[in-house]
Amino acid sequence: MRYFEDFTPGQTIELGSRAITREQIIAFANEFDPQVFHTDEEAAKQTFYGGLLASGWHTGSIMMRLLYEGVIKDTVSLGSPGVDELRWVKPVRPGDTLSGRMTILESIPSRSKPDRGIVKSLIELRNQHGEIVLTSKGMSLLGRRPTTSDGAR
């Protein structure tokens, strides 16, 4: 398991990658963001975007899955107090493969609760061409390494 102390400013963590299909784009959009450029391939060709693209919320959901697989599942995570910034930089299209990277910006031990701390990070998703498609600055609340009987962490 990883604890708060295992995350230091400047550290980068590769989060893995995931391909996105036409069917996934349409299914997500039909459920959560049914705008025509997410749901109808032919109608999407007539829009400003010139074709089908994933909802930004779908792209954010992929980011969350990569973050879970790459960090959270092996970390003493206590949730998140929120996201400060989320940007959809470039459209995500069917067939794109998205890769994630997390960069630690700040690690702040809690003053009132010594068993935890906040880690601020930047997450970037890139497509298979290396182009950034999403950025997110957010916070993770992480448990601190348990202390030993002599008080050392």
Image: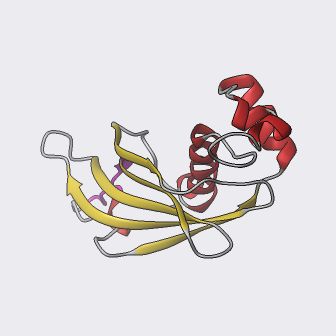
* Of 38 and 130, the residue lying toward us: 38
| Residue at the image position 65 percent from the left and 47 percent from the top | 49
Look at the picture and state if 83 lies above or below 31: below
* Horizontal side of residue 96 vs 139, given as left or right: right
The image quarter containing residue 16 is: bottom right
Q: Magenta part of the protein: which range?
A: 139-149
- Its colouring scheme is secondary structure
Residue sitting farthest toward the front: 46
| Residue at the image position 19 percent from the left and 47 percent from the top | 110
Count of marks overlaid on the render: 0
Residue 86 among those drawn in magenta:
no
Look at the picture and state if 56 lies above or below 67: above
Residue 32 place in picture, x, y as percent: 67, 25
Quarter the C terminus occupies? bottom left
Q: Does residue 71 appear in the picture of this structure?
A: yes
Residue 144 place in picture, x, y as percent: 33, 54
* Of 1 and 50, the residue lying toward us: 50
The image quarter containing residue 74 is: bottom right
Residue sitting farthest toward the left: 111
* Horizontal side of residue 122 vs 22, given as left or right: left
Look at the picture and state if 93 lies above or below 47: below
| Residue at the image position 70 percent from the left and 37 percent from the top | 37
Q: Does residue 145 appear in the picture of this structure?
A: no
| Residue at the image position 81 percent from the left and 34 percent from the top | 40
The image quarter containing residue 17 is: bottom right
Residue 102 place in picture, x, y as percent: 46, 65
* Of 44 and 58, the residue lying toward us: 44
* Horizontal side of residue 1 vs 59, given as left or right: left
* Of 129 and 104, the residue lying toward us: 129
Residue 24 place in picture, x, y as percent: 81, 42
